[in-house]
Image (tube, grey):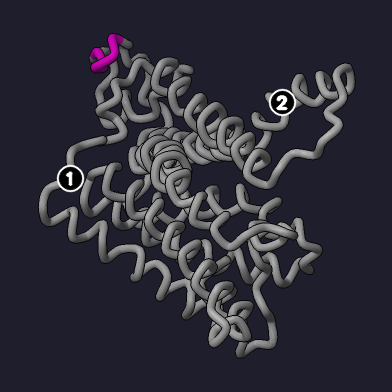
C-alpha cells in the first residue's frame, strides 16, 4: 500500500532534489500547488482510514460466507448457543478482521509494530487504566441523560436481547472483553487508524475523525432489537463520547496497552452491572434504565 508523498516538493527551488530522490522541475503554482497537495494528502488519509475502519465491518461477512455455505451442506440440527454465537463473532469480527486488517496495513506500508505504540504500562498508567472506565461510563451516562431529556431512549445492545440465559452468562463474557474486544478494536481504530490520521491532521482532529469511523461498527449490535433510527443515533452519540475519551487517552499516554485495557475494563464493568441488576430483586426494576445509562 503506497501512500502519496504530498509535501516533498513544497518550498523547494527548481533543480533541487527532494528527500525521496525526485528532482523539482517546476515551481508553477507556488504555494497554491503545495496547498493542493496537502489537501489531497488529507483527503487520502480520510479515505484510507475509512476504508480500513469500514473494512472491519465488511470483512467478517466475507469470512463467514464459507461457514454459512458449509451449514447448507452439513445442516446443524441444534441451534448455536448465545455464547457460541458470540465466540464466532469475536473470532471473525475482532481477531481475524480487525487484527488481520491491522497486520495487513503494517505489512503493506513496511511499518514496524512500534507504529501502534504498544508498551508496558507504568505505575501511573495502571492507575489511569483503573480510573478511565468510570470516566467513560460517566460521559456515556451524561449523553444518555441528555437523550432522555429530549424524549429519546437510546437503543440497547443486542447482548440484552438473548432469551433464556442465566445471569452468569454476562460474567463469562468479561475475559472476552479484556483479552479480545478491547485489544483488537483499539489496535485497529486507535493504533492504526488514529495514528495514521495524526500524520495528516492535528491530534484533536484525528481523534474526532477516528471516532466517527469507529462508531458505525456497532450498527448491527444496536439495531438488531428493532430500535428506531433516532434511538440508534442516540446510542451512537454515547459511543462517540466514549470513543473520543479512548482516543484522547491514547494520545496522552502514547500507549496502546493503556487504552486497550481501559476499553476492555469499561465493557467488563457494564457486563458486571447487568449481572448485578438482573440478580438483585431490589434493583431488577431499575435494570432497563440502568443498562441504557451505562451504554448497553
- Is residue 71 toward the left or the right of residue 185 in the image? right
Residue at (83%, 24%) from the top-left corner? 71
**Which residue is at 32% across, 57% downward?**
248
Residue at label 2?
62
Is residue 189 on the magenta stretch?
Answer: no
Which of the 4 image quadrants contains residue 256? top left
Quarter of the image that includes the C terminus: bottom right
Helix, strand or loop at label 2? It is: helix
What residue occupies the far bottom of the structure in this picture? 149
**Residue 18 magenta-drawn?**
yes
Residue, x 57% and y 31% (percent of image)? 91
In the rendered image, residue 68, in percent from the top left (x then y), is placed at 80, 26
Q: Is residue 74 above or below residue 176?
A: above
Q: Residues within 10 Å of mark 2 (few under 14, many from 20)?
A: few
Q: Which residues are magenta?
A: 17-21
Locate residue 195: give its quadrant: top left
How far, Cα to Cα, is label 2 from label 1?
36 Å
Cβ atoms under marks 2 and 1 closer than 8 Å: no
Is residue 32 shown to the viewer in this render? no
Percent across and percent down for residue 13 are 25, 22
On the image, the x and y values in percent for residue 128 come to: 22, 60
Give the image quarter of residue 114. Answer: top left
**In the image, residue 242 lies at what x, y percent?**
44, 63
Q: Residue at x 49, y 72 (%)?
A: 276
- Kindly identify which residue carries mark 1: 121
Residue 203 can be seen in this image = yes
Which numbered disc, 2 or 1, marks the residue that appears first in the sequence?
2
Instruction: Give the main secondary structure, helix, strand or loop, of the magenta stretch.
Output: loop
- In the rendered image, the residue lying farthest to the left is 123
| Classed neighbour count for the residue bearing mark 1: other residues with Cα under 10 Å, few (<14), some (14–19), many (≥20) | some
Amino acid at each position: 500500500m503506497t501512500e502519496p508523498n504530498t509535501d516533498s516538493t513544497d518550498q523547494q527551488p527548481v533543480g533541487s532534489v527532494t528527500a525521496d530522490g525526485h528532482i523539482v522541475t517546476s515551481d508553477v503554482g507556488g504555494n497554491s500547488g503545495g496547498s493542493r497537495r496537502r489537501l489531497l494528502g488529507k483527503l487520502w488519509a480520510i479515505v484510507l482510514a475509512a476504508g480500513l475502519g469500514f473494512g472491519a465491518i465488511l470483512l467478517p461477512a466475507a469470512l463467514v460466507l464459507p461457514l454459512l455455505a458449509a451449514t447448507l451442506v452439513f445442516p446443524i440440527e441444534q441451534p448455536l448457543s448465545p455464547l457460541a454465537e458470540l465466540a464466532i463473532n469475536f473470532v471473525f469480527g475482532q481477531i481475524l478482521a480487525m487484527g488481520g486488517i491491522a497486520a495487513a496495513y503494517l505489512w503493506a506500508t513496511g511499518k514496524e509494530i512500534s507504529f501502534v505504540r504498544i508498551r508496558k504500562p507504568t505505575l501511573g498508567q495502571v492507575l489511569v487504566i483503573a480510573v478511565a472506565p468510570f470516566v467513560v461510563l460517566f460521559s456515556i451516562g451524561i449523553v444518555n441523560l441528555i437523550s432522555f431529556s429530549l424524549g429519546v431512549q437510546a437503543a440497547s445492545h443486542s447482548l440484552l436481547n438473548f432469551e433464556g440465559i442465566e445471569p452468569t452468562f454476562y460474567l463469562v463474557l468479561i475475559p472476552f472483553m479484556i483479552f479480545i474486544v478491547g485489544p483488537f478494536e483499539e489496535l485497529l481504530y486507535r493504533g492504526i487508524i488514529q495514528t495514521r490520521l495524526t500524520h495528516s491532521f492535528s491530534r484533536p482532529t484525528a481523534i474526532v475523525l477516528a471516532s466517527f469511523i469507529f462508531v458505525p461498527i456497532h450498527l448491527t449490535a444496536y439495531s438488531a432489537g428493532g430500535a428506531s433510527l433516532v434511538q440508534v443515533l442516540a446510542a451512537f452519540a454515547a459511543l462517540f463520547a466514549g470513543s473520543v475519551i479512548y482516543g484522547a487517552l491514547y494520545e496522552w499516554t502514547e500507549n496502546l496497552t493503556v487504552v486497550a485495557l481501559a476499553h476492555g475494563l469499561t465493557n467488563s464493568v457494564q457486563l458486571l452491572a447487568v449481572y448485578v441488576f438482573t440478580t438483585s430483586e431490589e434493583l431488577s426494576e431499575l435494570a432497563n434504565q440502568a443498562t441504557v445509562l451505562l451504554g448497553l
